[in-house]
Amino acid sequence: MKLYRPLAAFAALAMAAGLAYAAPANFSEGFNNLPAAHWMRGRDKLTTPFGARDFTWFDDFFKYTAGDWVVTEINDSTQAMGDANGGTLVLTTLTAEDDAAHLQSVGEIFTVLAGKQMYFESRFKIGDATQSDFVMGLHIRDTTPLATSAGVYFQKDDGDALLDFHSMSASVDTATTGIHTVVDDTFLKVSWFYDGISTFTYAVDDVVLGSLTATPSTTEMTVSFGVQAGSAAADVMTIDYIYVWRER
């Protein structure tokens, strides 16, 4: 079976099947994403997107290197790779209530800054959606991640399955609660977008659920996530990936 067809043949097949077809754009001279005022804009020398306009941090957890993370535990926990397509990181608490495992990136590597758009996304699941606390987002370096004084993050409290979204600055919390019901052992995708002015738009499973207006903390933050058991049983948090993007 021949796997490749020229574009013209593909277009003919699509039209014969009654499918809409639009030819892909062809940038034969290349293109760049420089701002209009940049001195290299429009020149022939730079024909590809300019990567230094923004920066991206992405971990798909094909591996886990302990030295990349600062681990805060209540009693012992395990952090290990999961057997899953694309890789996962699995955090498992011990079996007493309030046993916990929280990870933060070694470096405080992000700021939420006025004038700079920013995006965060993660896909993960929790074993017990009610008897647990968890957090996922950006925080300052903190040994109490469930009670931080600065960050932008999703959090769920023990005793309910309701997801909350927070922008915390100097211990002043701007939050929207109960935006989504978390389900036991079921992956969810959480994301937020900062417009660079004052608005955070948040979404779950690619559905926008709302927005809030807040002045974010400008303190350097870590990538931060973790789980705390809400009953006398081990709890498990499984992280598929975490992605952060910001304009430079």
Image (cartoon, grey):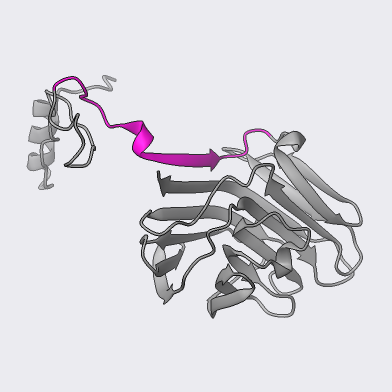
Q: Is residue 55 magenta?
A: yes
Locate residue 148 relative to residue 96 in the image: left or right: left
Specify the segment rendered in magenta.
44-63
Decide which of 7, 234 is in the foreground and name it. 234
Tell me the residue at 41%/73% (across/down). Answer: 211
Q: Position of residue 219 (x, y in %)?
A: 58, 57
Decide which of 25, 15 is in the foreground and name it. 25
Number of numbered callouts drawn: 0
The N terminus: image quadrant:
top left
Tell me the residue at 62%/34% (across/down). Answer: 62
Locate residue 99 relative to residue 141 in the image: left or right: right
- The answer to whether 203 is drawn above or below residue 55 in the figure is below
Quadrant assignment, res 85: top right
Q: Position of residue 84 (x, y in %)?
A: 63, 41
Is residue 128 visible to us here? no
Quadrant assignment, res 61: top right
Decide which of 108, 28 is in the foreground and name it. 108
Q: Is residue 128 magenta?
A: no
The C terminus: image quadrant:
top left
Q: Position of residue 136 (x, y in %)?
A: 62, 59
Tell me the residue at 41%/61% (across/down). Answer: 194
Q: Position of residue 48 (x, y in %)?
A: 25, 27
- The answer to whether 66 is drawn above or below residue 71 in the figure is above
Tell me the residue at 68%/79% (across/down). Answer: 160
Locate residue 158 relative to residue 183 in the image: left or right: right
Is residue 47 visible to us here? yes
Quadrant assignment, res 138: bottom right
